[in-house]
Amino acid sequence: MRDGQPHAIYLKDYQAPDYLIEHTTLDVDLGEDETRVRASIRFNANPEGKGKRELTLDGGKDLDTRSIAIDGRKLSHNEYKIEGETLTLFEVPEQFVLETEVLIKPQDNMALSGLYKSGDMFCTQCEAEGFRHITWYLDRPDVLSEFETTITADKSAYPVLLSNGNAVAREDLGDRHRVTWHDPFLKPAYLYALVAGDLEHIEDHFVTMSGRRVTLQIFTEAHNIDKVDFAMESLKTSMRWDEEVYGREYDLDIFMIVAVDSFNMGAMENKGLNIFNTSCVLAHPETTTDAAFQRVESVVAHEYFHNWSGNRVTCRDWFQLSLKEGFTVLRDQQFSCDQWSPSVCRIEQVQMLRSAQFPEDAGPMAHPIRPPSFIEINNFYTATVYEKGAEVVGMLATLLGPDAFRRGTDLYFDRHDGQAVTTEDFVQAMIDASGADLDQFQTWYHQAGTPEIEAKGHYDAVAKTYTLTLRQATPPTPGQSEKKPLHMPITLGLVGECGSDLVFDIEGCSAREIKGPDGYSRVLELRESEQVFVLTGVTSKPIPSVARHFSAPVKWIIDYSLEDLAFLSRHDSDGFNRWEAGQRLAIHLIDALERGNDGVSCDEASAMFLSVMTHHLKEALNVADSDVDGAGLAYNLSLPGLAFLGELRAEINVDSLVKARNAVKRMVADRCFDELSAVLEAALSDDSFAMTAEAVGRRALVNVCLDYLLASQRDEAVAIAERVYRGADNMTLWAGALRAVVGSELPSAPAARAWMLEDFYARGQKDALVMDLWFSIQAASGREGAVERVKALMAHPDYTLKNPNRMRSVIGAFAGQNVSGFHESTGAGYSLLADTIIELDRFNPQMAARMLGPLTRWRKYGAARGGLMKAALEKIQAQAERSPDVFEVVGKSLSDA
Ligand code: BES
Ligand code: ZN
C-alpha cells in the first residue's frame, strides 16, 4: 500500500471550512525540467466555521515546497508541518495572506491530474482534487475564490498561454513571454485551468440575449485545426438553446475550448476555458462517425451548460456531484433530443442506462445518486451519479410539467447564484416554485438499486374501465437491505384496437395530460408499494403503453402476449415504446432459444419476431422519403445488446447467451437476406456527406443491414461490404463495413478483412482518433481467438498504455464490449485485464480503477467463470503498490456485504 489503509469519508461528517479564500494569485513559471508555482492566497476566517486558528491545506507528495510565508514573513520550521499530503499552519490570524513557492514536474505527471503535459503542451485537469497537485490550497468545492494567474514560458514552444477569464496583461521577455489572466467570477479550485502550447485556433462570436458580444475560440494543434468547425457550430447552438429553454445567458466576454490528446475523461467545464479530450471535440466526415459527431455536439453542450449548472451554482461537497452532473446530463439530453429525433435520442439514453447503470446498481459498487461515503471521489463519476442522476431530475420535470419545472430551475439559479449547495437545495427550489409534495421523492437521492415494477391490467367492457395495478419493489443493495417505495411518474397511454390512442380519465386523481398530434398519455404518480389506477371512459379494449419515453429508471414486468408486443411495435404512438415492444419480443425469443426446451414457443416467437422485422424492413425501403425516420428504424431492427440481456438474468451463462443471440441474428440474416440487401441499396446514397437527420438515418440503416448480412451464411455479403467500403466518403460507413467484416465468419471475410484493415490503418496514421477506432474494432470482435488478437494489438508499435484513448480503445473495447472474448472459458481474458490494470495503476490510478468494472460483476457468472474473475481481482488486491482508487473498487467487489 502507498498510504497505509485508505479510509472512507462520510457525508454526515461534513463541516464548513474554518477559512474562506478571498483572492488567489498564481505565478506559474513553466519549464521543461520543472515548473515553479508561486501562490499568494488571501484567507479570511469563516464566520460559519468553528473558529479554529490552525489551518490545514491540501497538497500532494509531488509538491517540492521551497518557502512558506504569512503576511510577508517567512515561516520557520516550528510554525508549520508537512505530513503526507497536508500542510498545517499552526497559528494563523483571522485574516492573512499566505505566500508559498513550490516546484512541480508536469512532464512526469502520468496520472493526468493537476498540471501535466499532453504531447508538447501543458494543460490542467483539476476536478475533482487535481488543484492540490499544483499548489497548497483549500481544495474543496465550497471554497470559492477570485483567481489571477500569470503564466511565464518559452515564447517559441508555447506561444499560446491561457487561463480562466480575461487576459489583462502581456509582457515580452525576449526568449520567454508572460500573460496574466483574471477571472472575475468566484470559483472553487476544481474549475481552475491553465494551458500553454503551440496552438492554432478558430474564432467566432455569439451575441447573447441581452446583446453582449462574446468571443468564441477553439484551440488545437495545427494538424487538427480543420476538424473544429462542427464543435463551434455546436457551441453556438448550445448557447442559444440554453437562453431559450432555461433562460441562461453566458457571463464572460470570452469562451475558449482547447483540445488535448491525453485526457482521462471526455471534457472539463473550467470557467471560460473548457478543456476537451480530442475525441469529444474534433469532427470531420473522413475521421469521425455519426455517433462521434453527435457525441461532440452533446459534450460541447454539456460542458457549456455547466457554466450555470455547476459553475455559477456549484456543489457544497463531492457527495453532491449529481447536483451538477445529473442535472447537466439531463440538460444535454434535452438539448440533443431537440436537435435530432427525440425517440431515437431517448432509445440511446435508455440503452446506456440499462447497459451501464442497471448493472452497477445490481453489483458490489451500487450506490445512491448521492453516495453517503467514499474512499476516492474519482470512483464516483459513475453511470449512477450521471445517468441515473439525470433520470431523477428528468422525473421531476415529468412530474411537474414543463412550466413548473422551469419556474423551479429559475428559482434554483436565482436563489443560489454564487453558492455551493446540496441536492436538497435543488429539490427545495422545485417544491417552492411548484407547491408539489416531493418529500417522498427525496428517497431517490439516498436509496440505491433499480426498482422493479409489475404491471397487471384488466378491461371491463361493460363499465368501460381499465384497471391497472402497479406493484413496486427494490432489491437490496450492499449495506442497504430495506428499501422504501419510491415516488415516480408513469406516463401511460392506451392503444385501441385500430392502433390509435384512446382518450381516458382516471378515477379519483388528477393526472397531467400529454397530448401530441397523434398521441394521448397521462402522467400517473406512483407512490405506494401497490397502487391501483382505475381508468374510465375507455371505449374499447386497450393495450397499455406503459412508461412512455421511459418515464422512470425502473425494470418493468408486464405480461404482454406476443401479439400485443407485435401490435405495439407497429402502432404505439410513442417511438420509444415502439422500439421497446420489439426489444421485448427479441428478448422473449432469445430467452426461449437459450432455454431450448420448448420448441413450440420458439417457433411462435420466431414467427412473430420475423413478422415484425419484415414490417420494419418494408418501411425502411422508403428511406429515401424524408418522413421516414431511418435512425429509428435502424434501432427497431437491432437486437438487444449482450450487456442488457445479461442484466436480465440472475446468472449469466456466457456460452448459451451468446449462442442464442447469434442464432437470432443469423436467422434474421438468412431469412431476410434479400430484404436487408434491398434496404441497404435504398439507403446508400450518391449524395456527398451531410450531417442531417435523414443522412444519419440512412447510414445507420446501411450499417445495421451490413451487420446482419455479414452474419448470414451467404458469402456474397462480403462483396457487398467491400462495395460499401470502397464507395464511401465517410467514417461511419468505413467503420461500419470494417466492423461487420472483422466480425464475420464467412469464407471470403479474411481476404476482405486484410485489405480493409490495411486501408483503415493508413487513414489512422494521419489521425490518432481513427487509429483508436482501428484498434477498438479489432479488440471488440467476438471471433475466435480474441485474447491472442488483443495481445498482438497491445504489442503493436502504435499501442500505448499512457494515452487513455488508446488504452481504452483496446482494453476498454475488449473487456467492455467483447463478451465472448473477454469471458473466454480459460480465464485468459481476465488475467490479461488484471495484468494490464496492475501496470496502469502504477501511474494512472483513476483509469486503472475505471477499467475494473467488467471484473466486479464476478458473482453473476457462475462458479467456474466467477471463480476465475474473483481470482483476477485477488491478484490485483495482492499488489503491494495498489492505489486507493483500485483498493476501493476491488475491496468492495470482493467483500461479502
Ligand atoms: N466535470 C466532468 C469532467 C470530469 C469528470 C472531471 C470526472 C473530473 C473527473 C464533465 O463535465 C463531464 O461530465 N464530462 C463527461 C462527458 C459528459 C458529456 C457527460 C466525461 O468526461 O465523460
Ligand atoms: Zn459534467
Image (cartoon, rainbow, N blue to C red):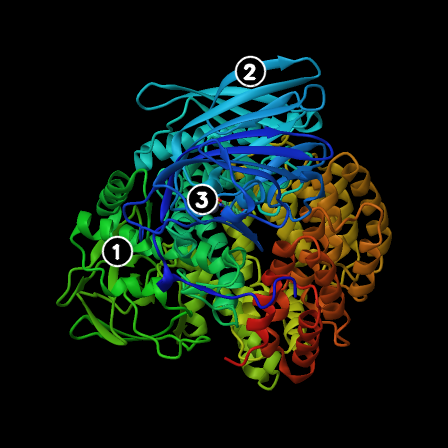
Residue that label 1 marks: 399
| Amino acid under disc 1 | Leu
**Residue type, label 2:** Arg
Asked if the residue at tag 1 contacts the one at tag 2, i.e. Cβ–Cβ closer than 8 Å, the answer is no
At which x and y percent is residue 228? Answer: 59, 29
Q: State whether residue 880 appears in this view.
A: yes
Give the x, y percent position of residue 45.
Answer: 33, 43
> In the rendered image, which residue does mark 2 sit on?
170
Does residue 408 lie above or below 613 as drawn? above
The yes-or-no answer for disc 2 within 8 Å of ligand 1 is no
Instruction: Name the residue located 68 percent from the left edge and 44 percent from the top edge.
Output: 109
Residue drawn at 45 percent across, 42 percent down: 336
Residue found at x 22% / y 54%: 513
Give the Cα distance between marks 2 and 1: 53 Å
Earlier in the chain: of badge 1 and badge 3, it is 3
Instruction: From the image, tell me which residue sits under label 3.
Output: 341
Q: Relative to residue 322, is residue 521 drawn left or right? A: left
Q: Are marks 2 and 3 in contact (CB under 8 Å)?
A: no
Dot 2 or dot 3, earlier in sequence: 2
Chain-order first, disc 2 or disc 1: 2
Q: Assign a secondary structure to mark 2.
A: strand
**Closer to us: mark 2 or mark 1?**
2
- Determine the residue positioned at 67% across, 64% down: 882
Picture quadrant where residue 786 is located: bottom right
Q: Secondary structure at mark 3?
A: loop
290 shown above or below 885: above
